Image (tube, grey):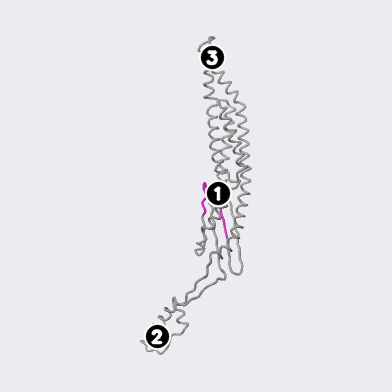
């Protein structure tokens, strides 16, 4: 079991580049990945997003990557047409002003657009720098989520144990409930008919009421849901969605038991189960 919340930070620096990766995870029903990159790395956004998505199934994940080049490869070119245009314009101006002077080279080079300087930015070269730092940050993020997930799992299973104990109380009182239904029905027949009771009619009416008010089926389904819950925790590394569904089913059975049974001990057990289940559902909001 993993938590959806976590934090990781990794950085790298050498004589050419300074790089850092920060990852934050929050609770979310589905997977949402937000990537914050320098504009010149935008071509790598989908690759980074796919990498994060391959490691996470649910949660809101914010990844921020910072890269500063301390030494860059550049290419320099000259716009000869622009240089020639500047030269001719300056010469014409000098002639108009009757100044016997030719423009210097450094003057022409300082004019806008004469020198074209482009940084050589190869996406694959950047990826070779980013990938190991991203992987290290994701491993730290994963370890943090697993650590928190273990604590969450222990708490959830503690509440499931409380649910099972309360369900056992309900199960022990199920025969009492059925006996009470039979006894109440027989007393009502006796009040109405006296000693001339038709046993077949009593048995038929008892069967109808037992089908309506007995909680045997609800107890059986409740036990099955609790067993499936624990099994899902053991076998599925990301059980959040399935456990959410099982909690809905458990809640349905608990509510039905509570509405059918007039026995005080069963009512108390239902309150215990509802409280434990609410704690489980609260914790599941943070489970992947």
Task: Measure the alpha-carbon separation of dots 2 and 1.
Answer: 68 Å
**Figure check: 268 above or below 33:** above
**How crowded is the residue under tag 3: few (<14 C-alpha within 10 Å), some, or many (20+)?**
few
Nearer to us of marks 2 and 1 is 1
In the image, 260 versus 128, the foreground residue is: 128
Q: Viewed as shown, does residue 88 lie left or right of 266?
A: left
Q: Quadrant of the N terminus?
A: top right
Q: Earlier in the sequence, mark 2 or mark 3?
A: 2
Please identify the residue farthest to the top as the structure is shown: 195
Task: Measure the alpha-carbon separation of dots 3 and 1.
Answer: 60 Å
Query: In this picture, which residue range is highlighted in magenta?
Result: 21-33
Instruction: Write the residue at 60% across / 44% down.
Output: 236
Q: In this figure, which residue is indicated by the disc labeled 2?
A: 91
Task: Measure the alpha-carbon separation of dots 2 and 3.
Answer: 125 Å
Position of residue 280 measured from the top left corner of the image (x, y, whole percent): 58, 40
> How many numbered circles are shown?
3
Tag 2 secondary structure: helix
Tag 1 secondary structure: loop
Position of residue 243 measured from the top left corner of the image (x, y, whole percent): 56, 41
Nearer to us of marks 2 and 3 is 3
The mark found on residue 57 in the picture is 1
Tag 3 secondary structure: helix
Q: How would you classify the magenta stretch by its main secondary structure?
A: strand
**How crowded is the residue under tag 1: few (<14 C-alpha within 10 Å), some, or many (20+)?**
some
Position of residue 199 measured from the top left corner of the image (x, y, whole percent): 55, 13
Q: In this figure, which residue is indicated by the disc labeled 3?
A: 200
Disc 2 and disc 1 in contact, CB within 8 angstroms: no
């Amino acid at each position: 079991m993993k938590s959806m919340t976590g934090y990781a930070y990794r950085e790298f620096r050498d004589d050419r580049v300074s790089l850092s990766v920060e990852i934050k995870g929050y609770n979310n029903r589905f997977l949402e990945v937000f990537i914050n990159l320098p504009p010149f790395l935008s071509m790598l956004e989908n690759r980074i997003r796919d990498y994060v998505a391959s490691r996470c199934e649910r949660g809101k994940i914010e990844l921020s990557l910072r890269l500063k080049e301390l030494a860059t490869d550049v290419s320099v070119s000259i716009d000869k047409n622009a240089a020639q245009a500047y030269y001719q314009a300056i010469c014409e101006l000098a002639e108009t002003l009757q100044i016997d002077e030719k423009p210097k080279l450094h003057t022409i080079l300082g004019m806008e657009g004469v020198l074209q300087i482009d940084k050589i930015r190869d996406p694959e070269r950047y990826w070779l720098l980013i990938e190991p730092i991203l992987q290290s940050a994701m491993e730290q993020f994963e370890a943090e989520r697993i650590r928190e997930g273990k604590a969450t799992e222990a708490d959830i299973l503690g509440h499931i144990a409380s649910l099972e104990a309360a369900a056992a109380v309900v199960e022990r009182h199920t025969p009492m409930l059925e006996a009470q239904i039979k006894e109440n029905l027989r007393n009502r027949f006796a009040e109405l008919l006296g000693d001339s009771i038709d046993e077949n009619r009593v048995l038929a009416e008892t069967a109808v009421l037992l089908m309506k008010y007995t909680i045997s089926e609800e107890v059986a389904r409740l036990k099955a849901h609790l067993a499936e819950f624990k099994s899902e925790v053991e076998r599925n590394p990301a059980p959040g969605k399935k456990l959410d569904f099982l909690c809905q089913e458990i809640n349905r059975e608990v509510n039905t038991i509570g509405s059918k049974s007039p026995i005080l001990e069963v009512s108390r057990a239902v309150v215990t189960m509802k409280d434990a289940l609410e704690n489980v559902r609260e914790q599941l909001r943070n489970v992947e």
